[in-house]
Amino acid sequence: MPAISPRETLDRAIDELLAQVIEQGSMVETSLRGSVKSLQHQDVDEAKIIYDADRQINKKHFDIEESVITLIATQQPMARDLRLLTAILEVTTELERMGDYGKGIARITVRIGKEELLPPIKHIPPMSEFCIDMLHRA
C-alpha cells in the first residue's frame, strides 16, 4: 500500500474541517430556528434546551479552531490552502457568534416565560428566515 503524501494528508484534513464547518452551520441553524419558535410559542422548556445546546456550538468552534492551528503549525500550508484555512477560522467564529444570538433569544424566552409579548413579535420570524437563508447561500 503506498504511503500517503503530505499533500494528501493536508487535503484530507481540509476536507474534514470543511465538513465540521458545515456541521457547525447546521447546529446554528437548528439553534436559530428553535429559539425563534420557542419565543413564538413561549415554550420555556425548549428554550432551555437550546440555551444549553450552545455549549456544543462553542465546543465545535474551538475544535475547528484548534485543528486549523495544528494544521498550520504542522503542515505549513501555502497560498490557496493557507487562505482557505484562515477563511475557515473566520467562518467558524461568525457561526459561533450566530449561535450566541440563538442562545440570547432562548434566554429572552426563559425570562419572559408565559407573560404577554409586548409588542407582538411578528417581524422576528421573517428576519430569522432571512438570516438562515443567508447562511445557506454562504
Image (tube, rainbow, N blue to C red):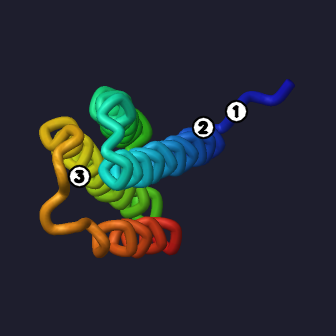
Q: Position of residue 132 (x, y in %)?
A: 44, 66
Left or right side of 11 for 33: left
Name which residue type carries label 3: Tyr
Left or right side of 110 for 54: right
| Residue displayed at 42% across by 60% down | 84
Residue found at the far front of this picture: 116
Look at mark 1 in the image and give the residue it sits on: 4
| Residue displayed at 18% across by 53% down | 116
Specify whether residue 116 is in view. Answer: yes
Q: Position of residue 93 (x, y in %)?
A: 27, 51
Q: Are marks 1 and 2 in contact (CB under 8 Å)?
A: yes
Name which residue type carries label 1: Ile
Q: Is residue 18 above or below residue 110?
A: below
Q: Is residue 3 above or below residue 71?
A: above
Look at mark 2 in the image and give the residue it sits on: 9
Label placed on residue 101: 3
Left or right side of 92 for 12: right
| Residue displayed at 40% across by 75% down | 130
Circle 1 SS class: loop
| Residue displayed at 40% across by 52% down | 37
The disc, 2 or 3, on the residue closer to the chain's N-terminal end is: 2
Name which residue type carries label 2: Thr
